[in-house]
Image (spheres, rainbow, N blue to C red):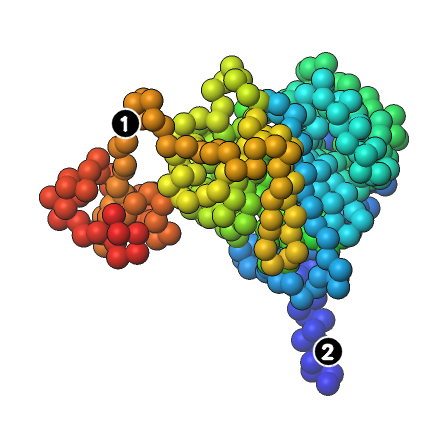
Amino acid sequence: MRKNLTALLLVILMLVSVAGCSTTKAVSALPQSVKSISGLTANNTESQPIAKNPAESLKNSTEKLPEDPSFEIRFLDVGQADAALIKCDGKAMLIDGGNSEDSNLIYSVLKAQKITHLDYIIATHAHEDHVGGLAGALNAAAAGTVYSPVDSYDSKAFKNFLKYVRKQGLELTYPPVGKEISLGSATVQFIGPQKDYEDPNNTSIVVRIVYGETSFLFTGDAETEAEHDIIDAGYDLSSTVLKVGHHGSEASTSYVFLREVMPEYAVISVGKDNPYGHPHDNTLSRLRDAGVIVYRTDMQGDIICTSDGKTVSFTTERNANVQTNPTMTDGSEDNTVIYIGNKNTRKFHLPSCKSLPLDKNRVYFDSREDALKQGYDPCKNCKP
Ligand SMILES: [Zn+2]
Ligand SMILES: [Zn+2]
């Protein structure tokens, strides 16, 4: 018995020291500018230490769910911007708040939902289309912790956001990357930003939310570089639903990233006829290749996703059955499929295959014939 107790103590001590290391490391790798005031950092005591292999740190399971489970994400139609309200077991979290002009909309959504307390607000990054409308949220509800990757940014929208945070007697809290917080019986894992980046989009806070056997990935406007760094950090990224990065920009949702996430569904928050050409045809094509069902706020308005811990279901404000990701028919698509070969196994795959080689072992072919001619065999799984 005493032996068992000693072993248990040792395990606890090891876990505590792992948690200590990861905290220091995460903070030191990132800008020191965001100060967490002592009252707010107390929230971090809820955080769980990450296991040595982060991929094993968060297991999907329905075991811990209450008898009457409730989990809902409302992807709000805020035009060319992002805002998602997540509710679980009476707790609430808002990820981004749309543009400044969406303040009133966010305010009325929270009032209509009778949310007077937002346990967490995540401002993924400093751009106006993410923080602009958070003033409306802070007017409607008292906030618990407000996460932001920076504590200052030279824009009217950010300064206004910060003003309303301080009006509540709060300061911004740096995201505890590598740690988890609870939202009712859901777990929110902070997996990015992994580094200090110059491009504000890459500084985006990235969270994976796990509810029972279902999971949801929010990447803000993170682009390929940040996506790769998250993959390299070794997290389990597999998610039932992907909130597509950067409004469907070509620079996000890379093949490699998509392969790790393997979502069944994707939600694109994007404005109709926006000047950036979002979502990009290539991003839509990658999602098509991966067989992902796409929902879009520009076509369908608010998108509501619920989970019972086992499966997710979607309802939309309008156009439930609209073709959200049609194959291009105007002739502008060149229909080229790239084939990816593995230098070691001499097999070639479709880009959507689950067993693609590492980047360094890849060779690309423009056609099937080309691959065969060079002595590569088709993969038996993806049958290119
Ligand atoms: Zn954006
Ligand atoms: Zn941005």
Label 1 neighbourhood size at 10 Å, few (<14), some (14-19), many (20+)? Answer: few
Badge 2 vs badge 1, beta-carbon distance below 8 Å: no
Choose top left, top right, bottom left or bottom right for residue 107: top right
Amino acid type at image mark 2 = Leu
- The kind of secondary structure element at disc 2 is helix
Q: Is residue 114 above or below residue 167?
A: below
- The kind of secondary structure element at disc 1 is loop
Does residue 205 appear anywhere in the picture? Answer: no
* Residue at x-position 82% and y-position 21%: 163
Ligand 1 closer than 8 Å to the CB at disc 1?
no
Give the percent coordinates (x, y) of residue 37: 82, 36
* Residue at x-position 75% and y-position 28%: 106
Label 2 neighbourhood size at 10 Å, few (<14), some (14-19), many (20+)? Answer: few
Closer-to-camera residue (330/362): 330
* Residue at x-position 47% and y-position 20%: 277
Closer-to-camera residue (234/327): 327
Task: Tell me: 317 left or right of 185.
Answer: left
Give the percent coordinates (x, y) of residue 370: 15, 40
Give the percent coordinates (x, y) of residue 198: 55, 24
Choose top left, top right, bottom left or bottom right for residue 63: bottom right
Amino acid type at image mark 1 = Asp
Task: Tell me: 370 left or right of 170.
Answer: left
Instruction: Specify the farthest residue to the left.
Output: 373
Does residue 339 appear anywhere in the picture? Answer: yes
Give the percent coordinates (x, y) of residue 18: 64, 56
Task: Tell me: 369 left or right of 78.
Answer: left
Q: Which residue is mark 1?
A: 334
The disc, 2 or 1, on the residue closer to the chain's N-terminal end is 2
Q: Which residue is mark 2?
A: 5
Quadrant of the drawing holding the N terminus = bottom right
